[in-house]
Amino acid sequence: MNRPSPWKRPLVSLIVWSMVLVVVFPLMWMILTSVKPQTELFRIPPSFWPREITLEHYFTLFTDTPFLKYLSNSVIIAVSTTILVIVVAVPGAYSLTRFAYPGRERLAILVLFTYLLPSVVLVLPLYLAMVKAGIANSLLSLVIAYTTFALPYALWFLRSFMASMPEELEWAALVDGASRMGAFVDVVLPETLPGIISTALFTFILAWNEYFYALVLVNTDEARPVTTGVITMLVSSFNIEWSLLMAAAVAMSVPLIIIFVFLQGYLVKGFAATGVKG
Amino acid sequence: MTTVALGTPRTGLGMSLQRQYALIGALLIAPTLLIFVLVIGYPFVYAVYLSFFSIYTPTLKGEWVGTDNYRVLLTSGEFWASFATTTVWTVGTLTLQIVFGVAMALVLNLNFYFRSLARSLVLFPYFVSTVVAVLVWRWIFNDVYGILNLALVVSGLSERPLDWLGSMPNAMVSIILVGAWKYFPFVVIAVLSRLQTIPNELYEAARIDGAGPWSRFWDITLPQLGDVLVVVVLLRTIWDFKEFDLIYLLTGGGPVTSTETLPLLVYNQAFGMNAMGRASTYAIGIMLVLLTFMILYLNRMRRQRSATS
């Protein structure tokens, strides 16, 4: 009992890894399908591993479809939303954690409330307002719409980060004669930087993945982001080309894969700092 | 609260410094407030206002109908049928998310090869766009060439391919399963980070007392996970209840209205039936239903914060 058997670790590994493989199977299947020639999909029985690897679907995707336009729209929307939200939320969250003024607690509760508010409540008035203002069907309309969930999210997120930071360094800076704003720029910002990066990454992912507002607010290819764009490709095609769609699914996941591979530490740290910690 | 202490000058410079600090605090929050009022506050009030109108979507022309929409909500049965569908979906998918999530977190906490790689791979379904998830699953569910039906037929589990998304109860089962696959990693991360903080001494003591793995799980692990599970259930209830993308893209609410959950009902009212006022009323209805869970969560967060600081 006290000395673990030498077989325990390999056995546990085998079991856990088979569970993990079941979970990631759909994503592996997506990648495998995207590099198979179309004929291999419809062979009976079909091949599991591609007999021949082809990149023709990716080539078609970028040359024969509006995918590249959708992709660049998504980049513009997600980057603008992220920048806007971070610039506003960092001072906002700092104010909510470190300053005393009337109504502060109520404001914090309001932020959390809006974070949980279903977008289905806001989508119709936003649609009406944007039609009236003449900015429906534009990239700007989506940046505005995405701010409605991204800003409360970032505020709540950053606030948890800042609340868990020790106040002593700020104190020391103030005692040394720094102004509040000086302490904010020189002490708080560098200290919060990992939190800001996490928040920015999550905000970007939220905006990149968003579908519902894009479905309601935009119906021209000019302003369509990649999420609704790819679905348009699915719906409008007469013969569904699954390998092309799988290539699109892989291509639109590339930013996430990059974030995962290089910046995963920030994601996990960020997750632990939000409301879910016990 | 410790945060108030920083706002109170210790140096004895008097009220002016405190007032100055309050002013800086107000300035820092001002842009946030402005945006909140413009893009959340105003639409929110507008949504309530719309719910008292009858509005024809294509022309956006409408007239005041008072509480008519609310009477329809309460009496027509359409809202409540959809409410029942939403409840089935939420309870089904959330239960699976919790069971799979806790199980996966427990095994990921064991000692095995390439553990950190496994931990990050499992998170993928959660971070990938719902559009990507739906595309993959629709391909897997494909009636003729989908790998799921091929596997079923080849293995002899089923004589002919199943219609996964176009018939009942398959469609409900399918969305519940895909929902569980997509969102269980949220439970994994939350539970896994909590598991790592359970002191090992508890397990040592139980082992000395002769407790087996099963009773160690029931008597130590599960009670320790209690708090985090309550928070996870509250958040996921809210998020699953308002889920639109996954269901809309997998079944579109069909067959007929069998999987038409409340958010889909709102969308269909507004852009299918062209009844934007009524759609807004239904949206307010969703919010009122979720308000209970939101308040429970808010109270919990507040208690937690006053306990930690």
Image (cartoon, coloured by chain):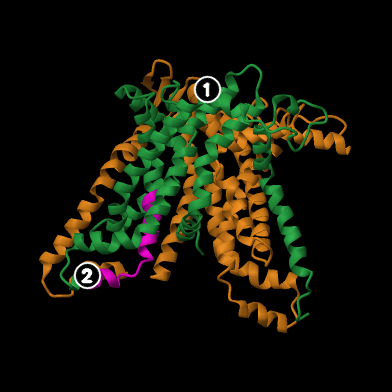
Chain colours: A green, B orange
The chain under label 2 reads A
Does the segment drawn in magenta span residue B6? no
State the residue position of label 2.
Answer: A173
Does the segment drawn in magenta span residue A169? yes
Q: Which residue is rendered at x = 34% and y = 55% of the image?
A: A108
Along the viewing direction, whichever of B103 and B268 lies nearer the viewer = B103
Residue B103: percent from left, percent from top: 68, 59
On the rendered structure, is B290 left or right of B144?
A: left
Start and end of the magenta stretch?
A154-173
Secondary structure beneath disc 2?
A: helix
State the residue position of label 1.
Answer: A63
The Cα–Cα distance between marks 1 and 2, rounded to whole angstroms, is 57 Å
Q: Which residue is rendered at x = 44% and y = 56% of the image?
A: B298
Count all numbered tags in the image, as a single digit. 2
The chain under label 1 reads A
User: Dot 1: within a 10 Å radius of its alpha carbon, few (fewer than 14), some, or many (20 or more) residues?
Assistant: few
Answer above or below: position of B104 versus A67. below
Secondary structure beneath disc 1?
A: helix
